Image (cartoon, helix red, strand yellow):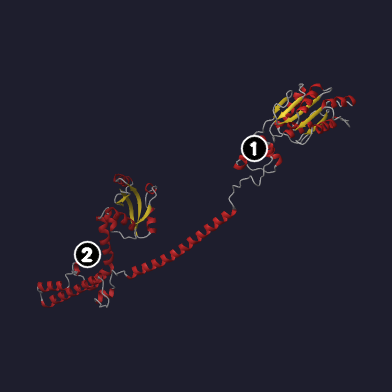
Amino acid sequence: MQSQILPSRAALVDRIALQFEYGQNLICLLGPSGLGKSYLLETFITDKYHNFNKAFVQLSGKMTDQQFMTELLEQSFSNPLIDHALSLSENFYQLYKQQPCGDCLWVIDGGRHLSEELIQQLEILAKQSPSTLYILIASQSVGQFSQAVEIHLEALNISESKQLMRWFFDSLPVEEDPVFRTFLQEAHGNPALLLAWQPEQQTADIRAPEKSYKLLYLILLLITTMLLIIGFLYKADMTEWWKAHYQQDTTSTVATALPAEAVINGPVESKEPASEHAQGESQAEQQVTNHDAVDTTQAANGPVDNSEIENSEKESHNNNVAAIVDSLLPAEQVAQETDQPTPDEVATAILSNAEPIADEVTESEPQQSLVGNAWYLTQPDDNFVIQLLAVTKQEISDKFINENGLQGQVKTYQSLRNGKPWWIVTYGSYSTLNDAKKGVTTLSDNVRKNQPFYKKISKIKQEIASLNQ
């Protein structure tokens, strides 16, 4: 018995044997070349009728009728004396009378090479044999035998085609392989074509070559290295620029207060021109000196003409030191002191209170009086604010401020984005980013859930400027 046979072919072997049992002594198996007729004949003669005297002959185009008859009879009888002048049936009858061979099974492959005379002799033997004689012939020609039962051999389906190839090939491509799938479809279940599969030539290698990945990695590494180098160079250039920028700001900063020696001892001449603020302080000190002189003269010689006092005041550029000191000192101290302050007291008051009060006057008044875009224009460019909301309708921003109790704590400016007006609500004004981050912690949870972020005043000024264009 052959080791492997497909289920459909095994069923066909059983069907042929069943036809012989039904009394059909001549069966012709039909099918095109490559469908496995020879393999099926070998399986049949091996697996069926073990007690029969079997003969298997494979015809070819070069084999003559006498050679075919000799080979067939020699396999059926032991040492037969064949008379080539007689036909196949006549030789069979004479040999059977001399030495009966019992039941016989003849399997003939390549029936299309049979001559008309041999076809007639086989039909006669199948019908008039003195003993049981089963004849199975494989051929490609339809209608070659008039008295034979013709059985057509069907092609293999896709599943049996794969199963057949798995028997003969150790490893097959996956079913999704387009080349392998096309090969199965074009083979049309022909075992000869299926077994002609060449894995090295008919397999699509869909994997990308390793060299391409190596080249890609190399390119990415080069790009990353270039970006890092550019980043370091840019950082170095920016560091130098910031150093130069801050040094320029430091050198251009003007002193806003005079030293104590300058206030007490009077103005000191300098080769460099003094700032406007320093000149004003010197003039205030000179006015104090003039008023002291007037008071001394009045105490010694009596009343002084008011015109002289007016001229003295004109010469000091109309700077009233007493009024300046009264505005700089706290209200309680002004109410308690009715006499004119001494020069030492004036100097002390200027050093202790001049700068904070001046800053408060210059900073607090615009913050209280200015609103909207004007307030942002007065802020330093480097300051930061916390943006809470940005909407296209002012009613929404007003409702947001009222619901969260932010009246008087926030500022709102208007800008133009994509041709539409926007209202942006901000909170606070901080000199550093760390102060702005601390300011966020003072906001309520309902406000912080909108994820407020930090914005520089210079950016806001640009947005306001775009609104006026």
Residue 410 screen position, x and y as percent = 31, 52
Q: Nearer the viewer, mark 1 or mark 2?
A: 1
Find disc 2 in the rendering and name its residue. 327
Q: Dot 1: what SS? A: helix
Q: Residue at x 22, y 70 (%)?
A: 280
- 10 vs 396, nearest the viewer: 10
* Outermost residue, right side: 98
Residue at the farthest front position: 85
Q: Amino acid at mark 2?
A: Ser
Q: Which quadrant holds residue 32?
A: top right
Figure check: 230 above or below 293 = above
Q: Percent from the top left, x then y, of residue 153?
A: 69, 30
Q: Which residue is mark 1?
A: 187
Is 289 in front, or is 281? 281
Q: Residue at position x 55%, y 56% from top? A: 215
Query: In the picture shown, does residue 3 fall above or below 464?
Result: above
Question: How far separated are the C-alphas under marks 1 and 2?
Answer: 109 Å
Hey, what amino acid is under mark 1?
Ala
Q: Secondary structure at mark 2?
A: helix
N-terminal of the pair, mark 1 or mark 2, is 1
Query: Is 94 displayed left or right of 41 in the figure?
Result: right
